[in-house]
Amino acid sequence: MATGEQRIESFGHVSRTVGTVFRYLLLAATLFGIVALTILLIYVANDAIQPLTADPGWHLTFFLTLVSPTLLVGGYLLRTDPASFRFGASVVGMLAVSTMFAGGAAMIFVDIVPPVVWFSYVLALALALVGVVGIERLDRQVPFLARFAAAGAVVLLAFGVVPDFVQSLPVYPTDGVMLTLALGGPMALVVGRYAAAEAGRRGSALAVLVGVVAVGTGAVLGPLLEIGAVPATVLLSIAVVPTAGYAVGAVRRRSARRSGLALTGTILGGALVGALTVDALGFAGPQSWVDWGFLTNAHSGTAANAGLYPAIGGSILLMVTVAVLSFPLGVGAAVYLEEYAPDNRFTRFIDVNISNLAGVPSVVYGLLGLGVFVTYLGQPTGTVLIGGATLALLILPIVIISAREALRSVPDSMRQASYGMGATRWQTIKNVVLPRAFPGILTGTILALGRAIGETAPLIMIGAPNVLFSLPTELSSKVSAMPLQVYAWASLFASEPFYQAAVPAGVVVLLIVLLSMNSVAIVLRNKYQNQQ
């Protein structure tokens, strides 16, 4: 007869009762943390969005047009076809996240990088790739060193001549046309090939053409909708066309998931019908502080006019700089330590120190950036380059550790099989190990960037300004960030309107950005795990 307690050698008394109590204690602790965090987020979101200030008719309209149909369709799909439900929800999520990223890209093209500059460098890159591919086709006719020198000369010539020549032309196409070719074209090429789904060259070419034409409509629709040709083109290139291509390609590959698009149509259609209805009936929505003005205005002395626009742009530039500096260094160090470095005392000493550096407080990295980049190298304080370099040092140990874990997850049998086929170590790493480990590497990097975007102490240490009234335009320009702006509102401009309005609104925007970046990492991780 089974008992709740028995004795096993080397374990002593083993009690099922103690194990059950321990399990429920863990469950209670987890639920307590989740509930406490949820209450905090609801409290902050309520101050920022103020949903109860909307008219009752506004709530009723969206309940009838959006909430009820979504619950009915979603519940039916979740019960009968969970895979289709997840597909439909993923399409909506992809559209929402990509729209946010499109807004950041539009900000860059409107105020930081002119479309003609982007067009000139993309054209230079295309010509350089054509030249390098043409040279590589002479594999058996020209020695390697000659081909390498010729390829380097082609790249230098393309980037040294083409951008200056294009930007010096007296007349060039409109911004919408240039972005359609230089941004929408490459995006349509990738999306069209995925959406065609084994339709052959003709089908792929047709899909790419449809994508380019769809992006090109932004130059016409943007001014009509009063959002501008550049933002409309960027939105179509980064959000609408990729989401539509993903939906079409997924349905072509697995036609059984087609019913999931009903959930997508219900959510998008319900939101559109609800917005048109409340506008026609004159129902007032929530008096939210997170509105278009808050996202597009600069800082102001009054909470009602304060905005987060320069801080958002600064965070974007910092994250681009951090990614450019930390990703190649971190992945390169991980590849060397995991694939080339011998197992000796020096390597183990490096491993221990990398693990320790990952747990060092961020303020220490701020002091390191101040001492190395500002004091020792004599660089100006608070610039995009210095801020990005300091944050790159902060997340570099995390990138190295996550990349090493991803490389370590590749089965050793795949390496041995590559060696058995006669491949060298470099060929094995390039063609076998890195492609297999890349999703894990990318996931770890995105999560590390999510930590960097929320840091305040390192930026304070290097002298970054709390408040800016314009976007930085160069790497040597002063830069602020969203955490710094929120900190300034909570300390330097401490008053009841800022506490109750601007601070919660800034926190909500920052959390949305963090959750969006983490959602990308989660999707990549799940996709990688499903492929195992």
Image: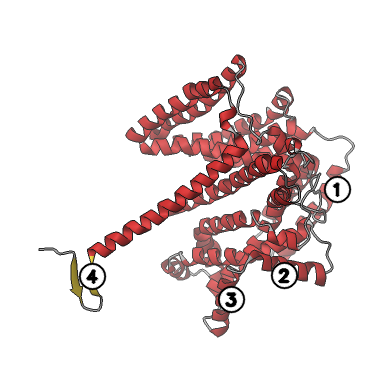
Q: Earlier in the sequence, mark 2 or mark 4?
A: 4
**Image x and y of residue 10, in percent:** 25, 79
Q: CA distance from mark 1 to mark 3?
A: 46 Å
Depth-wise, is mark 3 or mark 2 nearer the camera?
2
Residue kind at label 1, given as amino acid type: Asp
On the question of residue 531 being in view, the answer is: no
For the residue pair 81 and 200, the one nearer the viewer reads as: 81
* Residue topped by disc 4: 14
Quarter of the figure with residue 449? bottom right
On the question of residue 452 being in view, the answer is: yes
Task: For label 1, count other residues whose C-alpha is less than 10 Å away and answer few (under 14), some (14-19) or many (20+).
Answer: few
Give the left or right position of residue 377, taking residue 435 as reference.
right
* Residue topped by disc 3: 353
Q: CA distance from mark 4 to mark 3?
A: 39 Å
**Image x and y of residue 110, in percent:** 77, 39
Residue kind at label 2, given as amino acid type: Leu
* Residue topped by disc 2: 368
Q: CA distance from mark 1 to mark 4?
A: 77 Å
Depth-wise, is mark 2 or mark 4 nearer the camera?
4
